[in-house]
Image (cartoon, coloured by chain):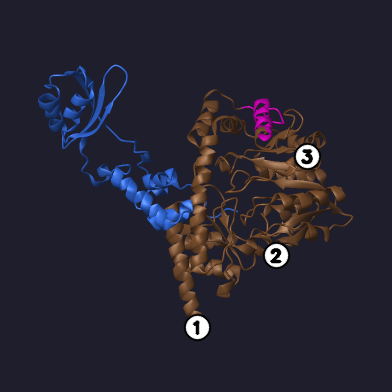
Chain colours: A blue, B brown
Amino acid sequence: MKEIFEILEQNARATPEQISTMVDKPVKEVEKIIKQAEKDGTIVKYKAIINWPKLGQGDVWALIEVRVAPQRGVGFDTIAERIYQFPAVYSAYLVSGTYDLAILVRGKNMQEISSFVAEKLAPLEQVQSTVTHFLLKRYKENGETFLLPKEMNKRLPITL
Amino acid sequence: MLNTKSTATNARDSLISQKVATLPQSGIRKFFDLLSSVEDVISLSIGEPDFVTPWHVREAGIYSLEKGYTMYTSNSGMPELRRELAHYLELRYGLSYHPEHEILITTGSSEGLDITLRAIINPDDEVIIPDPCYVAYPADVILAGGVPVLVPTNEENNFVIRATDIEARITKQTKAILIGYPANPTGAIISKKEANAIAALAKKYDLLVISDEIYARLVYGAEHICFPSLPGMKERTILISGFSKSHAMTGWRIGYVATERRFIQALTKIHQYTMLSAPTMAQIAAIEALRNGEVEVERMVQEYNRRRRLIVKRLNEIGLPCFEPKGAFYAFPSIRATGMSSEEFAEKLLVEEGVAVVPGTAFGQCGEGFIRCCYATSLPDIEEALRRIDRFIKRNRLNKT
């Protein structure tokens, strides 16, 4: 069953027919497993990975370290939720180490991110400090490197 | 492989050795030229993994250069690598080879095959080989001064060489049986029963078995039979393998031979005069591959298996019957229904649809009526290639009626 999800994680457009052949299971069974997973949230969503800079319209991204004071009873979750509900927050993680929350923020330009930090994030009562790192270049995302297939293919056209 | 006509002019050049001049050229040469003239080609004709060597292995190679490991190693190969190999063979197949005396590190398994044949063949000794087979087998036997004796195999016996067919061809000159399972170009694997029957023959007629197990790790839903692990066969088997296919390391040129001490001594003589030692960087990378490479090997095998199921199913649906290949990364469908020869089919498919496959005849006469499709290429490419082949078959079927 795990294999079905591995295939979908690599290629969200793989059809139940293709998957059924690849894992050697009946199509009906594969369809059922996928349906169930879509329903129970195992499969969250199907998305494309876009190489935006290639279109010349890259957003600005920042990785922000946030130190917060946890609240009695609910720990970090409540404050995390208050932060990740902002649409500008693309990803949010609770991490171990010298700060508590690592969040990835997306904005149209630097000003947008700066004002998010200055006006929304930093003023939150439990937020003690923030460190903002603007992303300069992306090499790999979601396990994918941004290389063209041509750059990757270094094999001779025929070998025996 | 066996394109005998093209060498006629060479044969007259007295400065070239007769043996080499008359040696047939690889049958795929003209495909190289054809390929460059066709645009947007999808190639199912590359006999190597499409994966790049796993990063941890590459990193080990880079580190070795940083540290300045750029000298020769011992002729036999780095002791550490031989120890790792002995351990690996013991763990996987229950074989015990002495790392100092029974393992030789070679520059790819190709070197292993070459020096093995040179070490055992006296002029006109015969070596039994299945047909179709990997192109180097008969050529290497000829270069070593021997005579290749081809034994036909077919889909009825799953392209596995049968003991009875071998026995019918054994003469006083027969020295060895050279097999390679899982097989290139058919993807066939050998069963324990079939292997045991060959082992019994080897004992009965006092023959050597040269077992090329370069594809050993690429088997799907079956167990790989490591030939020397059969009872009483370690002392009469020369095991040849390497890292190219299992660890996607074709360009590193690193392999090994494991066998009895007396054979290793003979092989080492040739190796020390011709190769000195296998590339040092590659040896260090191979140590890393053995120590920490298992996860990556399994990941690649799983991926090949998905593609294998897809390509075999689709080929059968398209109308190119394909027996189930349980090893390597090749499908070997029959194209007889089209009425074309293998070469005609491959050429036409390339020109009309931009899909490159290798005609079965490149691997011997018994490959006529078949093509080799390698599925060590990305899934989207395999799917597109199959769509094109489907179109090609439909059109050519229509043309006929």
* Residue farthest along the bottom direction in this orientation: B401
Specify start and end residues of the magenta stretch as a single range: B71-90
On screen, residue A125 above or below B363: above
Q: Do we see residue B377 in this rendering?
A: no
Q: Residue B372 lies in what quarter of the image?
A: bottom right
Q: Do we see residue A60 in this rendering?
A: yes
User: At numbered mark 1, what does the secondary structure look like: helix, strand or loop?
Assistant: loop
Check if mark 2 and mark 3 are on a common chain. Answer: yes
On screen, residue B326 above or below B253: below
Left or right of A126 in this view: B211:
right
Quadrant of the rendering where the N terminus of chain A is positioned: top left
Q: Nearer the viewer, residue B72 or B387?
A: B387
Q: Nearer the viewer, residue B20 or A7?
A: A7
Residue B127 % position (x, y): 79, 53
Residue at 60% x, 27% y is: B70
Kind of residue at disc 1:
Thr
Packing grade of label 2 (10 A; few <14, some 14-19, many >=20) is few
* Mark 1 → mark 3, Cα distance in angstroms: 56 Å
The chain letter under disc 2 is B
Q: Residue A127 lies in what quarter of the image?
A: top left
Task: Residue under label 1, please give it.
Answer: B401
Residue at 87% x, 57% y is: B171
Task: Residue under label 2, please give it.
Answer: B4
Task: Residue under label 3, please give it.
Answer: B234
On screen, residue B265 above or below B43: above
